[in-house]
Amino acid sequence: MFGDDWKKSLQLPPKDTRVRTSDVTSTKGNEFEDYCLKRELLMGIFEMGWEKPSPIQEESIPIALSGRDILARAKNGTGKSGAYLIPMLERIDLKKDYIQAIVMVPTRELALQVSQISIQISKHLGGVKVMATTGGTNLRDDIMRLDETVHVVIATPGRILDLIKKGVAKVDRVQMMVMDEADKLLSQDFVVLIEDIISFLGKGRQILLYSATFPISVQKFMAKHLQKPYEINLMEELTLKGITQYYAYVTERQKVHCLNTLFSRLQINQSIIFCNSTQRVELLAKKITQLGYSCFYIHAKMMQEYRNRVFHDFRNGLCRNLVCTDLFTRGIDIQAVNVVINFDFPKNAETYLHRIGRSGRFGHLGLAINLITSEDRFNLKSIEDQLVTDIKPIPGSIDKSLYVAEFHATNPNCEEELKETGRQQVEP
């Protein structure tokens, strides 16, 4: 097929007509074709519904293709996965039957999601073997799979280190290692494991770090392991554009009643409701069901197989509301979610940022509502100050144009209109 004829045979998803904010639309105007990618990879990219590279993808793809280390600070929901998966898959050599790339992620759910994306966008490449391995998968099955060809491993740190030390996962010829949600991977929970994993890699490996926040731990790691990294910072403001934030003062006993009121008044496509403990997740899910609303719940103490099923079913729209703990906050991409409710307010700014990033995915509009007790007041002020943002008191009625996609389906200039009317999402 010559010219653009090959595009005519693509199985494209329905066009997404929802308005998107400038953190994914203010690009340099590049096209995916500009990066000289294999046509088969381009086919997978377009069939994912990715029409043009987002800002983080524009910055990352050419640098990653050149082999240089990257330190990228970008918000959740702006196309980070594509920013590293596209150059990674482009560089896989199918003639070589060993592991060529590793993606490290902090949670099982994120490993599953990233592996699904990489399988989808590489489906026309003719034989790229992608494997996800986490603490919840069967170790014996993983060992058997590694006995055959695997090009890309997407893993949580503990499991991949176990497989490396058993001599099953041979990583000495890995050319690229990605750390997605690097701040979490370099926290006390994981940093020793990460250092151990890196000691098994060859000298010429490329390391790509992606995160929304960069604490001291990340800076120390960068100084030790990255070679003259290309630094990308798309985080002039920490809160996601497109997400309007409100709080409601309540007593603990009023929370369920307040939630019921929100359910009845808001136009929810899908919502995620956060609690601070696994016990409260189960209790609240039961209450929501008793109120007559469909509800799933997920937390870290559930069996992995059940968690996977809940995650899959919620993502496929089988249920409107999901109650969960912070397990669900990192990198999970469900674009149908337009409302996030903090039933329990988080203790720190980083957790808050990751939670509210569950709505407004890939630059779409969303709503974050926080139920605040008297004990949370100090935390609310502290988080506002740290994120340089303004969380407003909840009004009697909320303008649907702030979070309902259908209001903008026929108006591509909606973001400008929102700015003019002063109803644009909270900005520093």
Image: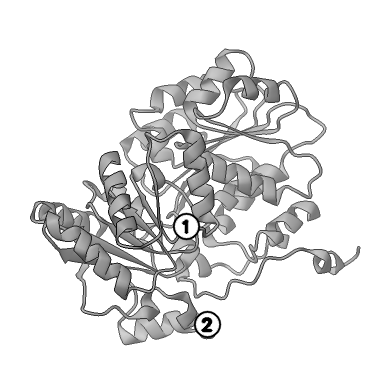
In the rendered view, tell whether residue 82 sits above or below residue 94.
below
Tell me the element at label 1: loop
Q: Residue at x 79, y 50 (%)?
A: 124
The residue under label 2 is: 412
Callout 1, which amino acid? Gly
In the rendered view, tell whether residue 3 sits above or below residue 96.
below
Q: Residue at x 47, y 66 (%)?
A: 363
The residue under label 1 is: 77
Q: Nearer the viewer, residue 152 or 282?
A: 282
13 with respect to 365 (left or right): right
Callout 2, which amino acid? Pro
Please tell me how crowded label 1 is: few (under 14), some (14-19), or many (20+) other residues with Cα within 10 Å.
many
State the quadrant of the C terminus: bottom left
14 with respect to 286 (left or right): right
User: Which disc, if any, is residue 406?
Assistant: none
Q: Nearer the viewer, residue 210 or 155?
A: 155
Where does residue 188 sit, x and y in percent of width and height? 33, 28
359 with respect to 89 (left or right): left
